[in-house]
Image (cartoon, grey):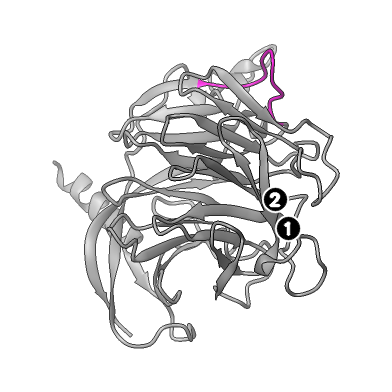
């Protein structure tokens, strides 16, 4: 490798190294260990067919360690999709399909998605999840996106829950309200939905049939109640730990709420509580050790990935800063972890990319 590339790689490693939280973070006290990550600036590999990403709104890792994204072709500007105009504006580029699958090395494996017979494609693609049976779940947060879609990994449609424009609010058990994301619990076969940009709840369905099971709002109370206890919009993520605890991102209120599977409230984790704008808690995932010791939280307003102790919610460190170089973020929107502990992040607004951060093991975090 040339010295030029060696120097460039070293610089990128420094850019992406885990940064200790600042002295104003009252949640930190004393020395601790936290995972350290370095960006891989060459992941994924270049796309074929002159394809280009729009806003990458969702990222997920399946049981094969393949990385899936959902992206928004309609978010591309005219100069970005210049080759598709009549007459062409430029030689590049062409919008990629909304759903894309990559292998661990970053090679494109499969790409599909968009409107088709028998289902209603969302007006604005949002979240993606691939369950333990390789089913692909897609959510949308457009004004009339009151539904979820389920496909095979090859893109064959199998189930729709809800109908566009049919949602009647938090009490509606048949339709959603601009859902942000979903997760299937492999132990129970239940689908948990973060619902969402229109509603203020977590709602649970049977993942095989779509039958309604239960729902709840902030603090385990009925959803939509006004005041400080209510979920704000959007209810942006739902994640299920191995111990059965359900983690919910209340983005605008800068907090994570933790529940049991039945909706019983367990505790709350506040993160960067003075954050305004779009809020601090956009998405989260767990470390891959047996006890899932760490939480990784995507913060699209401050543009960090926060590293927390899952037990207690103590902030240990943070990754990244606002910017568009490798290892930096602009509106980091979703996050996922593979079986080796590597992180993948998705960015919306004008960033329009997915990044990989390689896990370099535990390192001491200075107080």
The magenta segment: 112-122
Residue 196 — which label? 2
Query: Is 242 located above or below residue 113 in the figure?
Result: below
Tally of numbered discs: 2
User: Quick check: 112 above or below 344?
Assistant: above
Q: Nearer the viewer, residue 146 or 258?
A: 258
Q: Is residue 177 visible?
A: yes
Q: Where in the figure is residue 265, as x and y percent of width and height?
A: 60, 69
* Neighbours of disc 1 within 10 Å: few (<14), some (14-19), many (20+): some
**Magenta region, mostly helix, strand or loop?**
loop
The residue drawn where x is 36% and y is 35% is: 44
Question: Is the residue 5 above or below the residue 254 in the image?
Answer: above
Residue placed most toward the observer, 50 or 342: 342
Residue at 75% across, 39% down: 142
The reply, left or right, for residue 11 in relation to residue 108 is left
Q: Are the residues flagged by discs 1 and 2 in contact, CB closer than 8 Å?
A: yes
Q: Residue 128, image x and y in percent?
A: 54, 38
Q: Name the image quarter holding the N terminus.
A: top left
Q: Which disc, if any, is residue 344?
A: none
Q: Is residue 81 magenta?
A: no
Residue at x 75% of width, y 75% of height: 228
Q: Quadrant of residue 291?
A: bottom left
Q: Quadrant of residue 315?
A: bottom left
Q: Can you see residue 320?
A: no
Helix, strand, or loop for circle 1?
loop
Horizontally, is 207 left or right of 3 in the view?
A: right
Q: Which residue is mark 1?
A: 233
The x, y position of residue 338, in whole percent, is 33, 45
Label 2: element kind: loop
Which residue occupies the foreground of this view, 344 or 223? 223
CA gap, disc 1 and disc 2: 7 Å
Quadrant position of residue 161: top right
């Amino acid at each position: 490798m040339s010295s030029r590339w060696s120097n460039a790689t070293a610089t990128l490693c420094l850019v992406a190294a885990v940064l200790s939280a600042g002295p104003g973070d009252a949640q930190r006290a004393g020395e601790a260990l936290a995972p350290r990550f370095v960006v891989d600036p060459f992941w994924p590999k270049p796309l074929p067919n002159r394809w280009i990403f729009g806003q990458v709104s969702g990222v997920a890792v399946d049981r094969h360690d393949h990385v899936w994204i959902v992206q928004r072709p309609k978010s591309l500007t005219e100069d970005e999709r210049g080759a598709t105009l009549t007459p062409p504006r430029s030689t590049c580029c062409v919008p990629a399909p909304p759903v894309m699958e990559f292998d661990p090395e970053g090679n494109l494996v499969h790409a599909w998605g968009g409107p088709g017979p028998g289902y209603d494609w969302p007006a604005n693609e949002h979240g993606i999840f691939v369950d333990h049976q390789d089913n692909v779940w897609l959510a949308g947060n457009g004004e009339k996106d009151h539904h979820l879609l389920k496909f095979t990994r090859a893109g064959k449609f199998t189930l729709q829950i809800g109908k566009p424009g049919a949602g009647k609010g938090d009490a509606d058990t048949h339709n959603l309200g601009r859902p942000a994301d979903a997760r299937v619990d492999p132990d129970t076969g239940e689908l948990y939905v973060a619902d969402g940009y229109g509603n203020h709840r977590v709602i649970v369905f049977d993942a095989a049939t779509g039958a309604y099971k239960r729902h709840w709002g902030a603090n385990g109370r009925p959803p939509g109640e006004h005041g400080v206890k209510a979920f704000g919009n959007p209810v942006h993520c739902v994640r299920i730990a191995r111990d059965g605890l359900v983690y919910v991102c209340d983005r605008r209120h800068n907090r994570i709420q933790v529940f049991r599977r039945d909706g019983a409230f367990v505790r709350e984790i506040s993160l960067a509580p003075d954050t305004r704008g779009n809020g601090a808690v956009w998405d989260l995932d767990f470390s891959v050790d047996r006890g899932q010791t760490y939480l990784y939280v995507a913060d699209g307003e401050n543009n960090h990935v926060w590293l927390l102790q899952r037990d207690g919610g103590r902030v240990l460190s943070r990754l990244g800063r606002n910017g568009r170089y490798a290892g930096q973020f602009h509106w980091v929107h979703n996050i996922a972890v593979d079986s080796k502990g590597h992180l993948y992040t998705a960015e919306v607004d004008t960033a329009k990319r997915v990044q990989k951060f390689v896990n370099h093991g535990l390192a001491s975090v200075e107080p």
